[in-house]
Image (spheres, rainbow, N blue to C red):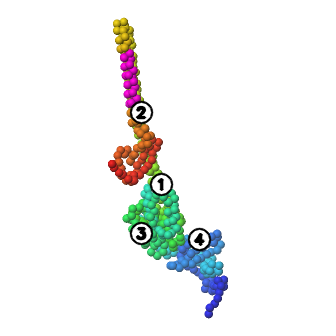
Amino acid sequence: MNRQMTVLQLSSYLKGVFDDEELLHDVSLTGEVAEVSYSDRHTFLTLSENDCSVRCMHFNSRDKIEKGEKIMLKGSVRFYEKRNSVSFVYNEFSPCGDGEKAAKFAELKKRLSELGYFENRLPLPKYIVNVIVITSADGAAIRDFIRVVSDKSPFVSVRVCPAKVQGVGAGEMMARAVKYLQNEKTDAIILCRGGGSDEDLDAFNDEALATAVATSKIPIISAVGHEVDYTLCDFCAGTRAGTPSIAGEIVNAHAAALINDILLLIERARSALENKQKYRETKVYDAVSSLSAAVSLGIEKKKRFISLLSERGYYSLKQKLAVKGQGVLSLAHNLNNAQTKLFRYKRDEVEKNHRLLKALDPHRILESGYAAVTLNGRLVKNVSKLKRGDKVKLVFADGSASASVDDVSKK
């Protein structure tokens, strides 16, 4: 017989069945607390046993109940028409000790601690530019992590090792991934998963995965769930991040350390090169000044000597003028011309030396459009000192620039 019913009629019928069934009233329900949450003054629980769970609630009471506890609730089963859902509404509760799941977790945690897995874990290196993330390839967690890293450190290489992060076999799959990546060249491995219920995070309490994390030769960041969630991987990893986004910020901090140190080295090299250039300029200027002073002193001495000779010749000519006559005057004129030519010669010689020194001035060469090339703080004088991929510095007259060698060719 085919009965036709509306949704409202079916919901009303089911509610009546639950309300009329005496076996569903005044029930004592026992199980392990899987989740606890509060809304206003109400308490909401998920009570579980093996793979089964029941949603429970206590109105107008904020009960102090811990996850993992085994408790007994007294109440009734209710059917809610609007949501077509079944809940257990309780009015009393009493603890029955630790739940089986919590007891197993505590026992495993104690055993791993006694093995020393929670101590002396590998810290992260000072610089991070290459990471591998073990996570679900299509999850929101990896997108959040990549977004945070790419915003501040786009040069960091992020590779993804896809793996199940919840459900049957997820822990073993991630453990195999950690072991496989031990032969990869990377600065850090990141276990990454977003928030979820305790059941969703059970894979990160897997003994095989915790052992693989604790014995890893590569530093590991555990970025699982929310900041309030703790798993065995958090205790075994060298670094714990409350969320995938926090893990991204940790990577950014170690990437920024590399940039800061590079900038510091560049500044030191620039300062050292400037000081060396100033020292050489000072030496050149001192040499030019000394030479100019010496030349000027020599010219003055020769001028005074020539002037003295001229005066003596004048007086001698004057005395012998009556005898020598015009011949003596001609000789004096020639002597005066010789003095002028000698002075001009010496002056031209000084100017020539000055132009030569000025042409040899390294600062003048740089002002002409040339640049000095340095590699690791040393001047590169020929192309055989360079190879492809070298990072060099170009020093100009008004500053410097960094460059990379793309190709090298020799004449």
Residue beneath disc 1: 256
Give the label on residue 37, or none: 4
- Pointer 1 or 3: first along the chain: 3
Disc 3 designates what residue? 177
Q: Are marks 4 and 1 in contact (CB under 8 Å)?
A: no
Marks 4 and 2, the one that precedes in the sequence: 4
The Cα–Cα distance between marks 2 and 1, rounded to whole angstroms, is 43 Å
The type of residue carrying mark 4 is Ser
Q: CA distance from mark 4 to mark 3?
A: 34 Å
Pointer 1 local density, CA inside 10 Å: few below 14, some 14–19, many at least 20: some
Marks 2 and 3: which is nearer the front?
Answer: 2
Does 113 lie within the magenta span?
Answer: no
Vertical order, 228 against 323 (above or below)? below
Q: Is residue 194 something that shows in the picture?
A: no
Residues shaded magenta:
333-353
Residue type beneath disc 1: Ala
Which dot, 4 or 2, sits closer to the camera?
2
Q: Mark 2 — residue?
A: 285
Under mark 2, the amino acid is Tyr
Identify which residue is drawn at 63% across, 77% down: 91
SS at badge 4? strand
**Three-letter amino acid code at disc 3?**
Ala
For marks 1 and 3, give the CA distance: 28 Å
